[in-house]
Image: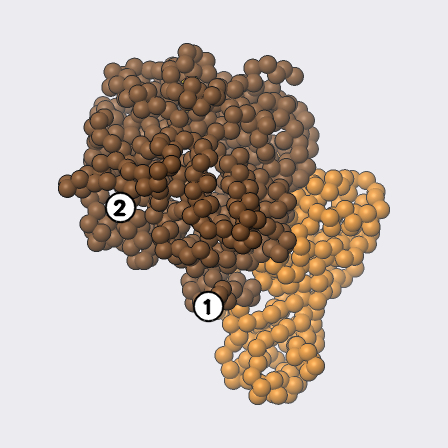
Amino acid sequence: MKLLLMFRKASALRWISHLDLIKVFEKALRRAELPIALSQGFNPRPKMSIALPLPVGTTSSGEYMELELEESMDPLLVVKKLNLQLPEGLHMMQVQVLPERGPAIMSVVDSSFYEIKIPLSEEETAKMGSVITTLQQKSEITVDYLNKEGRKKSMDIKPGVRSISWQMDTNKIEMHLETSSRLFVRPNYVLQAIAAEMYREEWKIDEMDIHRVRIVLHI
Amino acid sequence: MQEQHHILQDSKLANVHKPTRYIGNEINQIVKDPLQTEVRMAFAFPDVYDIGMSHLGSKILYHVVNRLEWASMERVYAPWPDYEALLRREEAVLTTLENKTPLCEFPLLGFTLQYELTYSNLVNILDLGRISLYAKDRLETEPIILAGGPGAFNPEPIADFLDLVVLGDGEEILPQLLHLYRNLQKKYQKRPPRQEFLMKAAEFDGVYVPAFYMPKYDEQHTFQGIERLVENAPMPVRRAIVKDLNQAEYPDALLLPYGEVIHDRAMIELFRGCTAGCRFCQAGCIYRPVRERSLETLLNQAKILIQSTGYDEISLISLSSMDYSQIESLVDTLLHDYGCQGVGVALPSLRVDSFSVDIAEKVQQVRKSGLTLAPEAGSQRLRNIINKRVSESQIMEAVSGAFDAGWSSLKLYFMLGLPGETDADLAEIIRLAERIAGVYRQKKRQGRLRISISVSTFVPKPHTPFQWMGQISPEEIRRRQQLLRSMIRDRAIELSTHDVNTSDLEALFSRGDRRLSAVIERAHELGARFDGWTEHFRFDLWKRAIEECGVDHRYYANHTKEITEVLPWEHLDSGVRKEWLVEQWDLALKELETDDCRFGPCSLCGVCMDYGVQNLLDKESNR
Ligand code: SF4
Ligand code: SF4
């Protein structure tokens, strides 16, 4: 039986790495005494995978995990048992049964919704609406990034920016960005473009409060 | 008036390399409401989280205190330099992980002293926690600073920073001390006066209050013994001993660390103490006698821990696990009961014999990791001197068994600078490794042979038969390391040695006295941190601090003391008698061995008579 679980990663748990997250789940699954299917080989691991790694420091209310059980079980009971074993900040929110022979969830990630808060001066707050409109109208948004080898590269993220908006009441920027294997747009790329548009320096790493609202899967 | 301290904002963690060292929130963490808890204690591990979270003793104390419903223990680890820089930049105070309480607000703060080169971190934790460094300067509103662990058996170098030192096993005495504190607090309806608490605490076996004693020196600045300042202060201070570990508390859950820590597995403690009698070994003296847990207790604890942690590996902890009376039954039962669930067994220490290799083979289905053995000395003569009772034929049998079982990678531990060591003894280390290589080649096995020889430098330790010996000089250490290196001909043999300056500093603190606290304070001020870590160790800072304080490093580290000399730690009783240590020193000079009292006659070290204890072995269990 294959299950798709949606979970939240919040508060202090946002600082744990992807590797730690897997460790936490593996041990929680053991403690919950669920009939988890194990991989073959010397070091049998629970058959479990996570749709998309969440960067350290980012919170989320819509991550996905795929889980394989050896026998059928009430999916809600799985959620209940697992939640009892998770540390504060990690919580399973939804569950659905997946077809036995579907594609791996990592391969069906399409895009993600984000909510972002950054410190803004009064002037910047006033300008934000028009800056976002400008970005929406641009045919190309070029940003710099460091590739795996640490070399500076640039790319056009515009095709991957599905939407972007400014919420005046909450002072949050909302984005819907493609996060597939074809094109991966990180929210801080968009922030970089906003900073450039405002002629200001980029926000520091500890100033960006990035929340992934949810991942969109193509299933 | 309590001043308000600034606590670091959570978002600032984005600036540090491994933020999970500072968030707490682990599975099995215990967080109690500060307002509902009568006695709150902070526990500080003066090394980084990754090391601290691997330490069993801390986990035991965490459990023992937190199971008292009126008390709590919260943790703090030494901040890594990136986090320290952040705290200082933000002018934020160091807090515990559980309730993010500033250290200075706790009534009690305890340190564990696992290693001499964490002393600068200890001072740094006090400093970042906004606590006066010296005990004499502390106000009634500041925490009482406690310390325990093996370092407590010579705490003199840091004694001026400490209010109270616990000698020996902590799991019974610590709750007693908290009880005492609670009662006094009830009497006063507020924090009790620290002097009264310390006076009462000093009545317990195992409690040493440094301020109740004062060292004396003569005109040549030679230590002349210690004087009592308080009439009833015990002399010597006795050690706290748990007689029967089956009756002692053990955690039913272990904190699950985040990040990559050194030992990330379930742990059961098979026994405490070791009577093998290696003469260089402090643990082999200060934890006597051997107190085994019964097979039944251990199997029960293993079951509970596997359930409460979800670990897939369980480690069998003790000073020499192969000596556990029921080791075979224990390993067999664990493998039988949990093997099918994918739970493995780990053995942290092996004895150098074929029996150990057989057991290691049983538990290790995947043979990726190498096998580690510790003959400690290359020649039989030197092994007799240090009382490592293993013969060359036993070593050969063990490695031959290991090769047959499929191992091709071996790690061998030796020591350099042992009493009576000559160049010929060092040559024997290399020759032994070559003979082992020969055994491997005779077997014509596939796979590349690797023999890693790790040679540490002998550091004389208080309360051991070698406590009088000076360490050989740094130049001589270098020469001997060089000599060893030059003798290696075989390409399968690799040699690693310890950093000379590190050993030199260890030797300074190991047999140090109270005059060293000024050095530690000064080195900390100059920036010394994490001195046990090569990437952070700044020997130049220490040299400068030592010089500025007018301390003669060579006297402490390299001077061989007369048997008649008073030692700075002699007022602290480890359980073994001085006569026994002297006798062992004599036997060492004569190159004579002493039996392990578990299997042979009692050698009258004294602890059993003086403390009403005995070796407690689980000979009966069978399953
Ligand atoms: S076997 Fe020797 S070195 Fe090991 S703990 Fe016992 S006395 Fe110390
Ligand atoms: S007193 Fe005797 S039996 Fe007890 S630990 Fe010492 S040597 Fe062993």
Look at mark 2 in the image and give the residue it sits on. Answer: B515
Q: Which chain is brown?
A: B
Crowdedness near tag 1: few (<14), some (14–19) or many (≥20) residues, C-alpha within 10 Å = some
Question: Mark 1 belongs to which subunit?
Answer: B
Q: Residue at x 58, y 58 (%)?
A: A15
Residue B26 in view in this figure? no
Residue B90 marker: 1
Q: Secondary structure at mark 2?
A: helix
Image height check: is A211 above or below B69? below
Image quarter for residue A185?
bottom right
Q: Amino acid at mark 1?
A: Glu
Q: Residue at x 68, y 78 (%)?
A: A170
Viewport quadrant of the C terminus of chain B: top right
Which percent across, then down, holds residue A85?
A: 70, 47
Which one is in front, B433 or B190?
B190
Which one is in front, B386 or A194?
B386
Q: Residue furthest top?
A: B601
Mark-to-mark CA distance, 1 and 2: 34 Å
Which percent across, then down, holds residue B509?
A: 30, 41
Chain A pictured colour? orange
Which one is in front, B470 or B36?
B36
- Quarter of the image where ligand 2 sits: top left
Image quarter for residue A113?
bottom right
* Left or right for B532, reference B56: left
Which percent across, then down, holds residue B196?
A: 45, 46
- How does the figure colour the protein chain or chains? by chain
Q: Secondary structure at mark 1?
A: loop
Crowdedness near tag 2: few (<14), some (14–19) or many (≥20) residues, C-alpha within 10 Å = some
Image height check: is B561 above or below B617? below
Q: Amino acid at mark 2?
A: Arg
Q: Residue at x 32, y 44 (%)?
A: B157
